[in-house]
Amino acid sequence: MSSGKYEPLDPVIHSQVRLAIMSVLISVKQADFHFLKTATETTDGNLSTHLSKLEEAKYISVKKTFRGKKPLTTCSLTERGRTAFSKYLRALEDYLPPNK
Amino acid sequence: MSSGKYEPLDPVIHSQVRLAIMSVLISVKQADFHFLKTATETTDGNLSTHLSKLEEAKYISVKKTFRGKKPLTTCSLTERGRTAFSKYLRALEDYLPPNK
Protein backbone atom coordinates (compact mmCIF):
# COMPACT_ATOMS: atom_id res chain seq x y z
CA MET A 1 0.00 0.00 0.00
CA SER A 2 2.51 2.60 -1.12
CA SER A 3 1.66 4.09 -4.49
CA GLY A 4 -2.11 3.58 -4.61
CA LYS A 5 -5.04 5.54 -3.28
CA TYR A 6 -4.39 4.40 0.27
CA GLU A 7 -1.14 5.68 1.75
CA PRO A 8 0.33 3.44 4.45
CA LEU A 9 -0.65 4.34 8.00
CA ASP A 10 2.38 4.55 10.29
CA PRO A 11 1.95 1.50 12.57
CA VAL A 12 3.70 3.28 15.43
CA ILE A 13 0.85 5.79 15.50
CA HIS A 14 -2.03 3.65 14.21
CA SER A 15 -2.84 2.04 17.55
CA GLN A 16 -5.71 3.35 19.62
CA VAL A 17 -3.71 4.25 22.75
CA ARG A 18 -0.71 5.68 20.89
CA LEU A 19 -3.02 7.68 18.66
CA ALA A 20 -4.67 9.12 21.78
CA ILE A 21 -1.25 9.95 23.29
CA MET A 22 -0.17 11.72 20.09
CA SER A 23 -3.50 13.54 20.00
CA VAL A 24 -2.99 14.82 23.56
CA LEU A 25 0.63 15.81 22.98
CA ILE A 26 -0.05 17.67 19.74
CA SER A 27 -2.30 20.06 21.69
CA VAL A 28 -0.15 20.66 24.78
CA LYS A 29 3.53 21.52 25.23
CA GLN A 30 4.02 18.61 27.60
CA ALA A 31 1.98 16.21 29.69
CA ASP A 32 2.85 14.10 32.71
CA PHE A 33 2.17 10.40 33.09
CA HIS A 34 -0.90 10.89 35.27
CA PHE A 35 -2.46 13.34 32.82
CA LEU A 36 -1.89 10.94 29.91
CA LYS A 37 -3.24 8.03 31.93
CA THR A 38 -6.44 9.95 32.70
CA ALA A 39 -6.81 11.19 29.13
CA THR A 40 -6.29 7.79 27.52
CA GLU A 41 -8.07 5.82 30.28
CA THR A 42 -5.52 3.06 30.25
CA THR A 43 -3.47 1.27 32.91
CA ASP A 44 0.01 2.23 34.13
CA GLY A 45 1.57 -0.80 32.45
CA ASN A 46 -0.23 -0.32 29.17
CA LEU A 47 0.57 3.37 29.03
CA SER A 48 4.25 2.69 29.82
CA THR A 49 4.45 0.16 27.00
CA HIS A 50 2.95 2.55 24.47
CA LEU A 51 5.08 5.50 25.65
CA SER A 52 8.19 3.33 25.25
CA LYS A 53 7.20 2.48 21.70
CA LEU A 54 6.72 6.15 20.85
CA GLU A 55 10.00 7.02 22.56
CA GLU A 56 11.87 4.29 20.65
CA ALA A 57 10.59 5.81 17.42
CA LYS A 58 11.81 9.18 18.73
CA TYR A 59 8.29 10.59 18.33
CA ILE A 60 8.19 11.72 21.95
CA SER A 61 10.78 12.60 24.56
CA VAL A 62 10.29 11.35 28.09
CA LYS A 63 11.86 13.12 31.05
CA LYS A 64 11.98 11.46 34.44
CA THR A 65 12.37 13.87 37.36
CA PHE A 66 10.91 14.24 40.84
CA ARG A 67 8.11 16.36 42.23
CA GLY A 68 9.11 16.40 45.89
CA LYS A 69 9.77 12.73 46.63
CA LYS A 70 7.47 11.44 43.90
CA PRO A 71 8.84 10.46 40.51
CA LEU A 72 7.46 12.58 37.70
CA THR A 73 7.42 11.45 34.09
CA THR A 74 6.89 14.22 31.58
CA CYS A 75 6.31 13.60 27.88
CA SER A 76 6.41 15.90 24.91
CA LEU A 77 6.24 15.52 21.17
CA THR A 78 9.52 15.77 19.28
CA GLU A 79 9.84 17.53 15.94
CA ARG A 80 10.08 14.09 14.36
CA GLY A 81 6.88 13.02 16.14
CA ARG A 82 5.09 16.15 14.98
CA THR A 83 6.11 15.48 11.38
CA ALA A 84 5.12 11.81 11.64
CA PHE A 85 1.72 12.70 13.08
CA SER A 86 1.08 15.22 10.29
CA LYS A 87 2.02 12.58 7.73
CA TYR A 88 -0.23 10.03 9.45
CA LEU A 89 -3.18 12.44 9.41
CA ARG A 90 -2.67 13.21 5.72
CA ALA A 91 -2.52 9.48 4.92
CA LEU A 92 -5.60 8.82 7.05
CA GLU A 93 -7.61 11.22 4.89
CA ASP A 94 -7.34 8.68 2.04
CA TYR A 95 -9.45 6.30 4.12
CA LEU A 96 -12.20 8.72 5.08
CA PRO A 97 -15.29 9.20 2.95
CA PRO A 98 -15.29 12.60 1.19
CA ASN A 99 -18.17 13.94 3.27
CA LYS A 100 -16.28 13.45 6.57
CA MET B 1 -11.51 4.14 26.96
CA SER B 2 -15.27 4.33 27.07
CA SER B 3 -16.50 7.43 28.86
CA GLY B 4 -13.56 9.79 28.33
CA LYS B 5 -12.59 12.08 25.51
CA TYR B 6 -11.42 9.21 23.35
CA GLU B 7 -14.16 6.85 22.23
CA PRO B 8 -12.99 3.29 21.54
CA LEU B 9 -12.09 2.56 17.93
CA ASP B 10 -13.77 -0.62 16.66
CA PRO B 11 -10.83 -3.03 16.30
CA VAL B 12 -12.57 -4.85 13.45
CA ILE B 13 -12.34 -1.66 11.40
CA HIS B 14 -9.19 -0.07 12.88
CA SER B 15 -6.72 -2.08 10.82
CA GLN B 16 -5.16 -0.55 7.74
CA VAL B 17 -6.39 -3.11 5.19
CA ARG B 18 -9.87 -3.47 6.68
CA LEU B 19 -10.20 0.30 6.91
CA ALA B 20 -9.31 0.51 3.21
CA ILE B 21 -11.86 -2.20 2.36
CA MET B 22 -14.59 -0.39 4.30
CA SER B 23 -13.58 2.85 2.62
CA VAL B 24 -13.95 1.30 -0.84
CA LEU B 25 -17.25 -0.41 -0.03
CA ILE B 26 -18.85 2.71 1.49
CA SER B 27 -18.46 4.42 -1.88
CA VAL B 28 -19.63 1.65 -4.22
CA LYS B 29 -22.60 -0.68 -4.16
CA GLN B 30 -20.39 -3.71 -4.46
CA ALA B 31 -16.83 -4.64 -5.39
CA ASP B 32 -15.25 -7.86 -6.56
CA PHE B 33 -12.16 -9.46 -5.08
CA HIS B 34 -9.88 -8.24 -7.85
CA PHE B 35 -11.06 -4.65 -7.50
CA LEU B 36 -10.51 -4.72 -3.73
CA LYS B 37 -7.10 -6.31 -4.18
CA THR B 38 -6.04 -3.56 -6.57
CA ALA B 39 -7.49 -0.81 -4.39
CA THR B 40 -5.90 -2.05 -1.18
CA GLU B 41 -2.66 -3.24 -2.82
CA THR B 42 -2.52 -6.37 -0.75
CA THR B 43 -2.05 -10.08 -1.49
CA ASP B 44 -4.81 -12.62 -2.15
CA GLY B 45 -4.19 -14.33 1.16
CA ASN B 46 -4.08 -11.15 3.17
CA LEU B 47 -7.20 -9.77 1.52
CA SER B 48 -9.06 -13.06 2.12
CA THR B 49 -8.16 -12.99 5.80
CA HIS B 50 -9.38 -9.43 6.26
CA LEU B 51 -12.57 -10.04 4.26
CA SER B 52 -13.32 -13.05 6.47
CA LYS B 53 -12.90 -10.96 9.59
CA LEU B 54 -15.31 -8.33 8.23
CA GLU B 55 -17.74 -11.04 7.16
CA GLU B 56 -17.61 -12.70 10.60
CA ALA B 57 -18.54 -9.35 12.15
CA LYS B 58 -21.40 -9.18 9.59
CA TYR B 59 -20.03 -5.84 8.34
CA ILE B 60 -19.87 -7.10 4.76
CA SER B 61 -21.62 -9.80 2.78
CA VAL B 62 -19.59 -11.94 0.44
CA LYS B 63 -21.17 -13.68 -2.54
CA LYS B 64 -19.28 -16.37 -4.41
CA THR B 65 -20.48 -16.95 -7.97
CA PHE B 66 -18.90 -17.58 -11.36
CA ARG B 67 -18.07 -15.33 -14.28
CA GLY B 68 -17.87 -17.91 -17.03
CA LYS B 69 -15.67 -20.58 -15.54
CA LYS B 70 -13.85 -18.21 -13.18
CA PRO B 71 -14.93 -17.88 -9.56
CA LEU B 72 -16.15 -14.40 -8.73
CA THR B 73 -16.23 -13.05 -5.18
CA THR B 74 -18.38 -9.98 -4.73
CA CYS B 75 -18.45 -7.97 -1.52
CA SER B 76 -20.82 -5.33 -0.27
CA LEU B 77 -21.33 -3.44 2.95
CA THR B 78 -24.22 -4.59 5.14
CA GLU B 79 -26.44 -2.17 7.04
CA ARG B 80 -24.62 -3.25 10.18
CA GLY B 81 -21.28 -2.50 8.51
CA ARG B 82 -22.46 0.90 7.40
CA THR B 83 -23.58 1.75 10.94
CA ALA B 84 -20.31 0.45 12.42
CA PHE B 85 -18.26 2.48 9.96
CA SER B 86 -20.21 5.66 10.77
CA LYS B 87 -19.68 5.02 14.47
CA TYR B 88 -15.97 4.38 13.87
CA LEU B 89 -15.60 7.64 11.93
CA ARG B 90 -17.35 9.60 14.68
CA ALA B 91 -15.08 8.05 17.31
CA LEU B 92 -12.01 8.73 15.18
CA GLU B 93 -12.80 12.44 15.22
CA ASP B 94 -11.91 12.47 18.95
CA TYR B 95 -8.33 11.63 17.98
CA LEU B 96 -7.91 14.24 15.27
CA PRO B 97 -6.62 17.72 16.02
CA PRO B 98 -9.36 20.37 15.73
CA ASN B 99 -7.82 21.96 12.63
CA LYS B 100 -8.06 18.70 10.66
Image: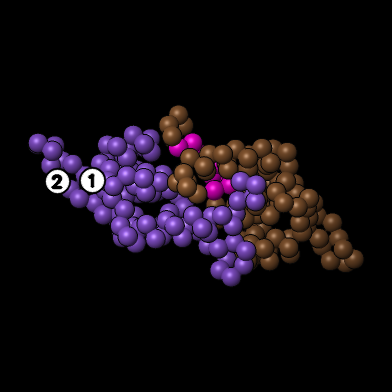
Chain colours: A brown, B purple
Q: What amino acid does circle 2 point to? A: Thr
- Residue plotted at (55% across, 63% down): B7
Residue B35 in the figure: left or right of residue A76: left
For residue A13: magenta? yes
Specify few, some or many for label 2: CA neighbours under 10 Å numbering under 14, 14-19, or 20 or more: few
Give the total number of marks visible in the rendering: 2
Give, as a single range, the part of the protein colored magenta.
A6-14
Q: Residue at x 24, y 51 (%)?
A: B62
Q: Are labels 1 and 2 on one chain? A: yes
- Mark 1 lies on a secondary structure that is strand
Task: Specify which label sits upstream in the sequence, 1 or 2.
Answer: 2
Q: Main secondary structure of the magenta part?
A: loop
Cβ atoms under marks 1 and 2 closer than 8 Å: yes
Q: Crowding near pointer 1: few (<14 within 10 Å), some, many (20+)?
A: some
Q: Is residue A45 visible?
A: no
Task: Give whichever of B89, A49 is nearer the camera.
Answer: B89
Residue A78 in picture, x, y percent from top left: 73, 42
Q: In the rendered image, which quarter is residue A20 located in?
A: bottom right
Q: Quadrant of the N terminus of chain B?
A: bottom right
Residue A79 sits in which quadrant?
top right
- Image-based side of B38 in relation to A70, left or right: left
Residue at 52% from the left image edge and 42% from the top image edge? A93
Q: What x and y, as percent, mark residue B53?
A: 34, 55
Name of the residue lying farthest toward the bottom: B3
Q: Secondary structure at mark 2?
A: strand
**Label 1 vs label 2: CA separation?**
8 Å
The residue labelled by disc 1 is B74
- In the rendered view, would you say A65 is above or below B29? below
Query: Is residue A73 shown in magenta?
Result: no
Residue closest to the far front: A99
Residue underneath mark 2: B65
